[in-house]
Image (spheres, grey):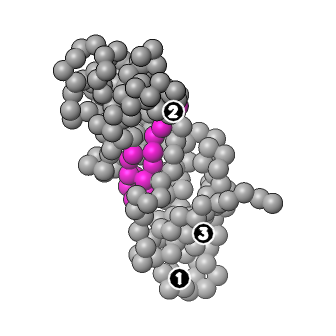
Amino acid sequence: MSGITPCLWFDGNAEEAAKFYVSVFPNSNVDVVHRAPNDYPSGKSGDVLLVGFTLMGQPFTGLNGGPQFQFNEAISFQIPVETQAEADRFADALSAVPEAEQCGWVKDRFGVSWQIVPHQLIRLIGDADRARAKRAFDAMMQMKRTTSPRSSAPPTASPHPSKSPNPRESRPNDGKGNLPSDGG
């Protein structure tokens, strides 16, 4: 049995989207482009109909289905990251709608939503120390772009900075949007 392949509905720009995504993600490539054998409701014979592509080892299909359906935040794709540099690179490459950024979510120029998820954030939110988990969660909820714990990155997020310069206090963040470190 083969795995599940997400099919993304585009309005005539599936090949452009696939090429863009392949340029952003490692271990990615456009696998196949199928052209319509006949006219169809959203295109003509010979137009790109389907694009098979792989992102970070995950197969996808892009379908040029027309303007009837648009992407929304009910579906998003998670991008796991280990470093702040990775998070920033993906956010900078993908985010085309800055006002849509929240809690590490970005929306690209095609309308697709992505979640940039630092592994450390998930570990902290699931921490057995519920106070530490709450601090991490509260910090994340205030961020536009997620900032990894122990990051020295410039401010990227919180519209509600903490009054405390000490990131180990029981505050949601350190005024720069940084999550509390896992040291408490």
Q: Amino acid at mark 3?
A: Leu
Magenta span contains residue 122: no
Q: Residue furthest left?
A: 163
Q: Is residue 57 above or below residue 111?
A: above
Find disc 3 in the rendering and name its residue: 50
Chain-order first, disc 3 or disc 2: 3
Toward the viewer: 79 or 133? 133
Q: Amino acid at mark 2?
A: Gly
**In terms of sequence position, does the residue under pointer 1 or pointer 3 come before the other?**
1
Q: Which residue is mark 1?
A: 44
Mark drawn on residue 126? 2
Q: Residue at x 81, y 60 (%)?
A: 1
- First in sequence: mark 1 vs mark 2: 1
Nearest to the eye among marks 1 and 2: give it.
2
Task: Give x and y (percent) for residue 84.
Answer: 44, 26
Residue 110 appears in the figure: no
Is residue 159 toward the left or the right of residue 140 in the image? left
Instruction: Label 3: state its secondary structure.
Output: strand
Question: Bounds of the magenta span?
Answer: 105-121
Tell me what residue is drawn at x 64 percent, y 50 percent: 58
* Residue 106 versus residue 40 in the image, above or below: above
Say if residue 96 shows up in the picture.
yes
Number of the front mark, 3 or 2 = 2
Which residue is depicted at the point 46% across and 32% down? 125
Q: Bin the neighbour count of mark 2 within 10 Å (Cα to Cα): few under 14, some 14-19, many 20 and up.
A: some
